[in-house]
Amino acid sequence: MKTPGGRNILSMNDLSRTEVGHLLNVADEMEDALRLGERLNILEGRIMAALFFQPSTRTRLSFETAMLRLGGQVMGFSDIAQSRSGACWGEALRDTASVLDGYADVIVIRHPRVGAVREFANFAHTPVVNAGDGIGAGAEHPTQALLDLYTIRKEFGTLDGLKVLIVGGLHQRAARSLMLGLGKFRDVTLYLACPDRYWLTPQEQEALQSAGVSIERVEAVEDAIHEVDVIYHNGMSEDSEEYVPENLKLTAAKLQAAQDHLIVMHPLPRAEEISYEVDDTHHARYIQQAWNGIPLRMALLRKVLATVTADLYVTRVRTAAAG
Ligand code: CP
């Protein structure tokens, strides 16, 4: 049964700038509560299904942590082979959706096929959250983009007027959703360092520019590192063995040219595109970024399962934090 006030989170395009700002504000409140050691029970009695038809470490476990921290419960699977959707039957997604609709209050899904999560949502009344679907045109990872925006806003206090260098394969969903997210804010300049084979389609580039984003294509990290506030390395591809050319690697030596306030982000997992010596610089944020997934996903679960009680509880937490 659909929860009153509940809704799907399938694409960054589904969220307005105001909604993103509100979610990040609630994530701030959730983070305050976590740091104060507050016990939050606003989703007590609610169940989250985590259906991961594709591997994950951070997304699944931070969603589960978020739900547990809110007093809810979790169930699901982390391997398509454990389900009837895999080789052992190949059940149609619409049948899985129709059945699981009655099992949980919110369903979080990762799937290797672009559009599969939306297809699932079309056959479910329960709120559905896209935890990453596919690669290439239409692929999205909206909750990653939200935690990325949260990480950037925590650092700079704003998402307007920033210069961001995105490095690696732009066919990958984390970068794609982040670009859509940044497109909601003013005066954003994206410097993009990406091989031809993974470059944006003309339509994608035009859509970003229509949203007000300035795009500058660069060949190497060195071409923009001195200009930017954020380096977001997205890795080359889903293949951890893919060769990373020197011009797209980030090293501590290259960071010598960076502004002091620059932060380095990566959705993880990484291969050899960010050397381990970068971890010891004051620029590295990727571990913090991964942790930020917890308060952000707490905020998101509260949003899709919103009730009056939840609103009151967060108000109480805010008052306690202010005092
Ligand atoms: N960033 C991210 O999506 O990581 P996982 O694949 O480990 O969930």
Image (cartoon, helix red, strand yellow):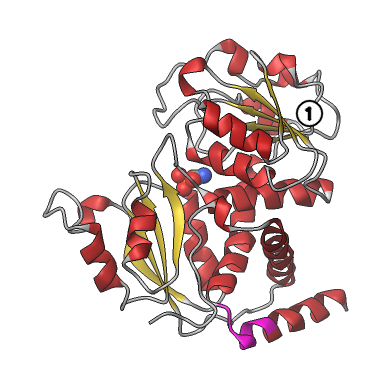
Query: Between residues 206 and 267, which one lies in front from this camera angle?
Result: 206
Some atom of ligand 1 lies within 8 Å of the CB belonging to the residue at label 1: no
- Dominant secondary structure (helix, strand or loop) of the stretch shown in magenta: helix
Image spot of residue 44 (x, y percent) = 51, 84
Q: Establish if 25 lies above or below 311.
A: above
Q: Quadrant of the N terminus?
A: bottom left
Question: Secondary structure under badge 1?
Answer: loop
State the quadrant of the C terminus: bottom right
Q: Name the residue under label 1.
A: 228
Res 234 visible: no
Badge 1 amino acid = Val
Q: Which of 259 and 214 is in front in this view?
A: 214
Which residue corresponds to the image point at 46% horizontal and 85% vertical from the top-left? Answer: 45
Total numbered badges shown on the rendered structure? 1
| Residue extending farthest left | 89
Foreground pick, 128 / 150:
128
Which percent across, then down, holds residue 120? 33, 60
Q: Which portion, as a residue range, is magenta?
A: 306-311
Q: Residues within 10 Å of mark 1 (few under 14, many from 20)?
A: some
Residue 29 spot, x, y in % from top left: 73, 69
Q: In this view, does 102 lie to the left or right of 303?
A: left
Where, by quadrant of the figure, is residue 168 drawn?
A: top right
- Does 60 appear above or below 106? above
Q: Where is residue 158 in the image (x, y as percent from the top left)?
A: 81, 49
**Residue at 85%, 27% in the rendered image:** 259
Magenta-colored stretch includes residue 58:
no
Note whether 113 is above or below 257 in the view shown.
Answer: below
Is 43 placed above or below 150 here? below
**Residue in the picture at 55% in, 66% down:** 66
Q: Can residue 63 be seen by looking at this rendering?
A: yes
- Asked whether residue 307 is drawn in magenta, I would say yes
